[in-house]
Image (cartoon, rainbow, N blue to C red):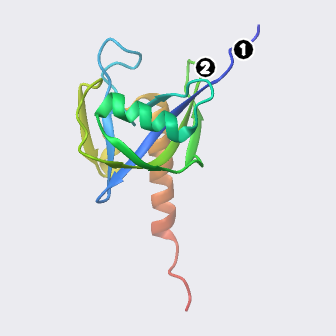
Amino acid sequence: MESATPVRVVAAVVRRYGRLLVCQRPAHKRHGGLWEFPGGKLEAGESIADAASRELREELGVVVRTVDEEAEYSVADPGSHFVLEFHPVEIDGDPKCIEHVAHAWVTPAQLLTLPLAPGDRQYAEHLERERTVSVSLPPPVA
């Protein structure tokens, strides 16, 4: 059986004051009611920055200031042909729910208490592992 071509999805990791922006998906969509990082599919010929700008404008009414073209983390979405790429993004403006049910600014610890979409949960667990490793490292020797 031939596998479907992977579809790249940009997931915007927006940080402010030590908190991360997450959004709750509408009930009628795939992973309805679950929380996710905002973003969406890259269209043909679109760059990561273009996709992030378009998706965050459409979903949250914000302007993207910067996008790190290098993914911080990437994961195949279980049960689909999507590959989620988590990119640090800086925005201007206050998010408004245009396509989502709710949005929240959460700490990395709070993130794991939310019912997250599967790929977003894997990223949250990655963040927790990174945090645990950095906390347990000894201080640098001067």
Q: Is residue 115 visible?
A: no
Q: Which mark is residue 3?
A: 1
Task: Tell me the CA gap for discs 1 and 2.
Answer: 8 Å
Q: Is residue 15 visible?
A: yes
Residue drawn at x 35%, y 48% as measured from the top left: 91
| SS assignment at label 2 | loop
Q: Amino acid at mark 1?
A: Ser
- Position of residue 4 relative to residue 22, above or below, is above
| SS assignment at label 1 | loop
Identify the mark nearer the N-term, 1 or 2.
Answer: 1
What residue did someone put label 2 on? Answer: 81
Does the residue at mark 1 contact the one at mark 2 (Cβ under 8 Å)?
yes
- In the picture, the quarter occupied by the C terminus is bottom right
- Position of residue 92 relative to residue 7, above or below, is below
Q: Amino acid at mark 2?
A: His
Residue at the extreme right: 1
- Position of residue 11 relative to residue 142, above or below, is above
| Left or right: 93, with 1 as reference point | left
- Location of residue 103 in the rendering, given as x and y in whole percent from the top left corner: 25, 36
Q: Which mark is residue 89?
A: none
| Left or right: 22, with 126 as reference point | left
Give the quadrant of residue 94: top left
Residue drawn at x 60%, y 49% as measured from the top left: 70
